[in-house]
Image (cartoon, coloured by chain):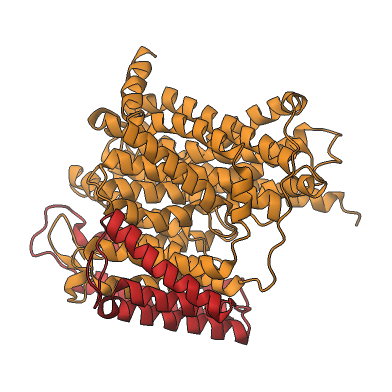
């Protein structure tokens, strides 16, 4: 069932893609016979055939993921989004320390060890990547190296 | 022949520069480590570390030497977790668990690890030698390809991909289509018309290759690890002092040679990599053993040596079409190909003549790397084995941190961070739906090339589609494509029928 839902969603996206390819993309003048719209049109047609085959013959019944796992995945996603959001305002060291601590805790490490891990990885990561390798990382409120 | 040696000389000149030797060693070491960690295979390792390597501002040949080192290093390392934990590091190492783990269980872990290291070394080196001999010839031939031949080549690549990778060919094809469709976003190079950009300026240049790779592989892997997270610690078998004996090598020498040949040629086929090669080599070895198969699956040395030699040979074999044709032979080489494009180096048949320092430097570095890996893997195996006990709850956040560093350090745009998270969720979902991910990246990398060649071919013929089937080269490639689809299907049908006939009715 879930297979059909997924294939159906992809089909809708592909139809939208095909619609754009067949109606909206146009070159004011073109040098080659198929132009900018031809290739997406071909792709859309093949993809629609492919998805119809998948709709007719699905093979994955359910995601087979239980409730606690969903909760864990949702929390991990939330943490990642928060990490991305806070990356620049808090700077690499603080954001990473927070993220690594909470993530390790979520995955089953004890609080103390998680915090030690988080702080180590935040500070060491910054020193190695920004200091040693010269990569561009946000410093946030802390002084830049 | 002389030309090959001269070019190899150039290559070694690049590969033996102290800085590049250091990169080979770092790459091989990091690769072995990544391969050894359960769950993180070569493709994820290369995906996560690619943007960092890019961000370091290395010259293209050095960056490629580093990334390739990580790639085949990970193929070496994959065997460690297979043997000691019975958990394959990636799909290519699955067959290694069958006989490797039983050997470790009966107290011969050291022997299994050293034998497989030697098998890997022979497989890898054998493939590099074949690559140096035949690669340039193939490239010279490929220079004569017209745009329409290239179209045929792509069709062949995707056909062999669909029939050999994954369980459901429609899903593999759809995966490739998703990649191809993603590649059409952005401004069309020929006419300057924006496609599928929805007026978002960030999308005008298309979706960045690095972001797709990091999202679909690195971040999706993270979600996968969170989901699969094992609560109990995995039990690592101890590495003992047993070591491979001369008699073991004498017994497995033909096995290793056969498996290396099988691995190399399967690796060359577009789209098929180490996992297919090791499975085929294992099956072939079992058949070759004739009546004497009772030990297979219980710790037979031949069953350990064959897949290990094959998957390393395939890993190098997959580089051949990438370097000579610009068509990657596997998901990981697709990423390496994308890396070349990031450095504005157009992969393809002209690479050998236009950028000999890259093509030959890479090949020469693989000789060095294989020797280095053998040396690293024999005495240091205990160190890597200890790495296996690092708990998953520290490794998983590390993936996200590395991915963020990589993506942010390139352009410093926080929008990209959200994009990789979204792509990661999408990749995870695709994996749950049993869509193979390698075709997506292959489609994404080849999309532009496929379209350009089709349009070029049709421009030459002023819109006449017959040009696509005019030359004998294209016809031969279409023939091979049909064969690639029909042959495996027929074989599996015959196998099923034979099994049914044999079963008592």
Q: Drawn colour of chain B?
A: orange
Image x and y of residue B299, in percent: 79, 43
Is B275 placed above or below B313 here? below
Residue positioned 40% across, 53% down in the render: B442
State the residue in front, B46 or B480. Answer: B46
Residue A105 lies, with reference to residue B245, above or below; the image says below
Residue nearest the observer in this picture, B276 or B296: B296
| Residue A131 x %, y % | 28, 58
Instruction: Identify the residue at the far top of this view.
Output: B2
Q: Residue B158 appears at what percent x and percent y? A: 44, 50
How many discs appear? 0
Q: Quadrant of residue A66?
A: bottom right
Q: Considering only vertical position in the picture, is A24 above or below B317?
A: below
Quadrant where the N terminus of chain A sits is bottom right
| Residue at the (50%, 59%) spot, across then down | B172
Q: Tell me if A51 is positioned left or right of B210 in this view.
A: right
Quadrant location, the C terminus of chain A: bottom left
Within the image, what quadrant is residue B283 found in?
top right
Which color is chain A depicted in?
red
Q: Nearer the viewer, residue B92 or B387?
A: B387
Residue at the spot 58% in from the left edge and 79% down from the top edge = A110
User: Which residue is situated farthest in the right direction here?
Assistant: B504
Seen at 38% across and 80% down, the residue is A81
Residue B8 position within the rendered picture, expressed as x and y whole percent measured from the top left: 36, 22
In the displayed structure, does residue B393 sit left or right of residue B83?
Answer: left
Q: Residue B122's image quarter?
A: top right
B296 with respect to B188 (left or right): right
* Any part of residue B411 in sight: yes
* Residue A49, visible in the rendered structure: no
């Amino acid at each position: 069932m879930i297979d059909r839902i997924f294939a159906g969603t992809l089909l809708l996206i592909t139809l939208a893609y095909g619609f754009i390819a067949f109606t909206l993309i146009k070159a004011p003048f073109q040098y080659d016979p198929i132009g900018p719209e031809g290739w997406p049109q071909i792709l859309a047609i093949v993809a629609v055939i492919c998805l119809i085959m998948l709709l007719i013959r699905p093979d994955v019944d359910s995601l087979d993921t239980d409730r606690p796992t969903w909760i864990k995945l949702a929390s991990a996603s939330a943490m990642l989004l928060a990490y991305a959001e806070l990356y620049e305002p808090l700077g690499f060291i603080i954001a990473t320390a927070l993220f690594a601590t909470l993530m390790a805790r979520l995955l089953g490490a004890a609080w103390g060890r998680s915090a030690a891990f988080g702080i180590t990885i935040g500070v060491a990561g910054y020193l190695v990547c920004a200091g040693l390798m010269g990569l561009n990382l946000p410093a946030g409120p802390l002084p830049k190296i | 022949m002389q030309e090959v040696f001269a070019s190899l000389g150039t290559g070694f000149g690049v590969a033996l520069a102290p800085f590049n030797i250091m990169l080979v060693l770092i790459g091989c070491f990091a690769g072995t480590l990544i391969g050894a960690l359960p769950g993180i295979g070569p493709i994820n390792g290369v995906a996560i570390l690619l943007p960092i390597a890019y961000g370091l501002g290395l010259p293209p040949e050095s960056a490629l030497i580093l990334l390739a080192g990580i790639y085949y290093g990970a193929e070496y390392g994959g065997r460690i977790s297979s043997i000691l934990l019975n958990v394959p590091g990636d799909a290519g190492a699955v067959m290694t668990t069958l006989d490797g783990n039983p050997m470790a269980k009966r107290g011969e872990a050291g022997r299994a690890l050293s034998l497989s290291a030697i098998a890997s070394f022979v497989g890898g080196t054998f493939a590099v030698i074949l690559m140096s001999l035949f690669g340039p010839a193939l490239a010279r031939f490929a220079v004569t390809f017209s745009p329409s031949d290239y179209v045929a080549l792509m069709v062949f690549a995707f056909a062999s991909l669909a029939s050999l990778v994954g369980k459901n060919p429609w899903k593999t094809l759809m995966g490739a289509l998703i990649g191809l469709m993603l590649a059409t976003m952005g401004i069309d190079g020929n006419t300057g018309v924006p496609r599928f950009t929805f007026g978002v300026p960030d999308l005008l240049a298309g979706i960045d290759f690095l972001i797709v790779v990091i999202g679909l592989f690195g971040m999706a892997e993270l979600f996968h690890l969170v989901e699969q997270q094992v609560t109990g610690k995995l039990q690592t078998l101890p590495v003992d002092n047993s070591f491979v004996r001369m008699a073991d090598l004498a017994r497995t020498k033909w096995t290793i040679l056969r498996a290396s040949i099988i691995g190399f040629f399967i690796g060359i086929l577009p789209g098929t990599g180490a996992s297919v090669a090791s499975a085929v080599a294992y099956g072939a070895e079992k058949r070759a053993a004739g009546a004497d198969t009772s030990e297979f699956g219980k710790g037979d040395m031949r069953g350990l040596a064959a897949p290990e030699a094959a998957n390393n040979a395939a890993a190098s074999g997959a580089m051949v079409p990438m370097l000579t044709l610009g068509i990657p032979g596997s998901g990981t080489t697709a990423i390496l190909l994308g890396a070349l494009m990031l450095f504005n180096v157009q992969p393809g048949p002209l690479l050998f003549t236009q950028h000999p320092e890259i093509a030959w430097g890479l090949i020469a570095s693989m000789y060095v790397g294989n020797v280095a890996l053998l040396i690293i893997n024999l005495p240091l195996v205990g160190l890597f084995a200890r790495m296996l006990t690092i708990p998953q709850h520290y490794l998983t956040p590390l993936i996200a941190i590395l991915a963020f560093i990589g993506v942010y350090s390139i352009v410093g745009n926080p929008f990209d961070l959200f994009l990789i998270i979204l792509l990661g969720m999408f990749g995870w979902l695709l994996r749950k739906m049993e869509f193979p991910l390698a075709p997506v990246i292959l489609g994404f990398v080849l999309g532009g090339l496929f379209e350009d060649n089709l349009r070029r071919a049709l421009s030459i013929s002023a819109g006449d589609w017959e040009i696509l089937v005019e030359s004998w080269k294209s016809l031969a490639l279409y023939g091979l494509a049909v064969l690639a689809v029909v042959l495996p299907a027929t074989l599996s049908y015959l196998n099923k029928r034979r099994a049914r006939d044999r079963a008592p009715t």
